[in-house]
Amino acid sequence: MQLALRRAALSLWRGTVDIIVPPRCLACGEEVTAPATLCVACWSGLRHVDDPACNSLGLPLAYDQGVDAISPAALASPPAWDRSRAAVVYDDASRRLVHLLKFQDTQEAGLLMARMMARAGRRLLAEADLLVPIPLHRLRLWTRRFNQAGFLAGQLSHLAGVEMFPLALRRSRMTRPQIGLDASARRRNVEGAFRVDPPWQPAIDGKRILLIDDVRTTGATATACVMALRRAGARQVDLLTFALVINPMQPDV
């Protein structure tokens, strides 16, 4: 009874707030019917990565080849992780949401991104034992005050009911930003930069880990994290991101 009353009060409060300050589209500012959403035009402008998609790289496929289909790119160069999915392609439309969360601490953008990730990665979430966000170095976290991957992992943990270990991975050395680096430079930049400290290894050993990040570009950072998790005994490591860069050689990603 008390729970029902609390929910009714919360619903009334939200309705009152929405009347006083109507919710706006996160991308363009137009009025929308609910907070942490996009208007129809901005939602349609996103390039959603729906099935069929490569089970390994998450790349969109031209036709349905089954749930375990592997793209030619994955066959030619298998990634370090087992499976991956992304909600959208990284472009001008999705970049707006990423930057709102990453650089402006707009949590409403993160709420929307997490809901979209939960839909795109529902199979990976259903089979995961633990969620692990890609970490920031402590100095970068101090200057930025916010780890977007950790926020997304927390929301996904709530949505899917999967436990999150935010401290399982540690970035053991400071690396330069990856923006503007080519694939080989990105690999060298983050090689050996992540570790699982001994107290966390028993929690990782034998588990199916779902690694969480906002954007996957070349996969160099994710690969370094996957290798650290495998050294700690992870049985399986999958990857779930909000956005996937189709052309990693863009200079601004």
Image (cartoon, helix red, strand yellow):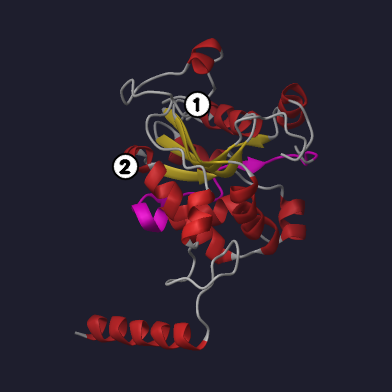
Location of residue 91 in the rendering, given as x and y in whole percent from the top left corner: 62, 43
Q: Does the magenta run of residues contain 229?
A: no
Q: Distance between the residues labelled 2 and 1?
A: 19 Å
Indicate the amino acid at tag 1.
Answer: Leu
Residue 115 place in picture, x, y as percent: 43, 55
Q: Earlier in the sequence, mark 2 or mark 1?
A: 1
Label disc, if present, on residue 205 of the rendered structure? none
Residue 84 vertical position relative to residue 93 in the rendered view, above or below: above
Q: How crowded is mark 2: few (under 14 residues within 10 Å), some or many (20 or more)?
A: few
Is residue 147 visible in this depiction of the protein?
no
Image vertical order of residue 87 relative to residue 148, above or below: above
Residue 158 appears at what percent x and percent y?
Answer: 39, 58
Element at label 2:
helix
Part of the protein shown in magenta? 157-176
Magenta span includes 162: yes
Of badges 2 and 1, the one in the foreground is 1
Mark 1 surroundings: few (<14), some (14-19) or many (≥20) residues within 10 A? many
Compared to residue 248, the image places residue 99 above or below, namely below
Circle 2 is placed at which residue position? 126
Q: Which of the two residues, 210 or 138, is positioned nearer the viewer here?
A: 210
Question: Cβ–Cβ below 8 Å for labels 2 and 1?
Answer: no
Residue 201 pos. (x, y %): 50, 37
Please state which amino acid type lies under the numbered disc 2: Ala
Q: Residue beneath label 1, please?
A: 57
Q: Element type at marker 1?
A: loop
Which image quadrant for residue 27? Answer: bottom right
Prevailing secondary structure class for the magenta stretch in the rendered image: loop
- Asked if residue 185 is positioned above or below residue 18 in the image, the reply reads above
Position of the N terminus, as image quadrant, is bottom left
Instruction: Say whether residue 3 is left or right of residue 147.
Output: left
Residue at the location (50% across, 80% down)? 22
| Quarter placement of the C terminus | top right
